[in-house]
Image (tube, grey):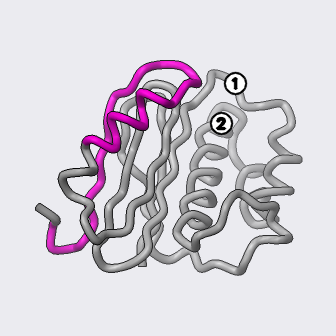
Amino acid sequence: MMPASGLLLIGLRTPQGEDRTQARRLVRQALDEVSAGANVSISHASGFSVAAVHSHGPVGIDLMRLDEQLMPDWEAVARDYLGPAALARLAGCRDEHRAVCFAQEWTRREAQLKHHGCGLVEWARAPVMQNSGCLMLTLPQGYVGAVVVD
């Protein structure tokens, strides 16, 4: 049954690894029961998957598994895909928190793009999007995620 807010979030433990076939099957099974006529967004990371079902409008969700170390070219990736404001926030993070901060910025951005029906695109080519309606998800340790609804 869909909650009154029209937003249902699903999180599932899925097999570890890069092959997402089994994860997709498990998520689709869970969604079959609740998604009729609703907007759906899905994201997978090794070992965990999330889905958002929204009956009142578009929805975007994204998930990232945290690695022990942040990628060495995080600044270039942030500049190209997250934009100047996110890059400034990341540069201001303490080194030991930067991986989590990067994952928060990344998942927020990907959830926004999905909400607007866009694929991953560089910052300069992306449509202008508002940050309203973005919520960071509470997930198992080692995962960061965000959901965007109107």
View extreme (left): residue: 1
Specify whether residue 20 is painted magenta: yes
List the residue tagged with mark 2. Answer: 99
Q: What is the quadrant of the C terminus in the image? A: bottom left
Image coordinates for residue 43, horizontal then vertical, percent: 49, 46
Could you tell whether 27 is left or right of 68 in the image? left
Residue shown at 69%/40% (left/top)? 94
Name the amino acid, label 1: Gln
Residue shown at 51%/51% (left/top)? 62
Image coordinates for residue 114, horizontal then vertical, percent: 56, 63
Q: What is the quadrant of the N terminus in the image? A: bottom left
List the residue tagged with mark 1. Answer: 69
Disc 2 secondary structure class: helix
**Marks 1 & 2, CB-CB < 8 Å contact:** yes
Disc 1 secondary structure class: loop
Res. 59 mark: none
- What are the residue bounds of the magenta stretch? 3-29
Name the amino acid, label 2: Ala
Would you place residue 119 above or below residue 74 in this image? Answer: below
Specify whether residue 76 is painted magenta: no
Question: Dot 2: within a 10 Å radius of its alpha carbon, few (fewer than 14), some, or many (20 or more) residues?
Answer: many
Would you place residue 126 above or below residue 21 in this image? Answer: below
Residue 117 position by quadrant = bottom right
Would you place residue 117 above or below residue 64 in this image? Answer: below
Image coordinates for residue 97, horizontal then vertical, percent: 62, 37
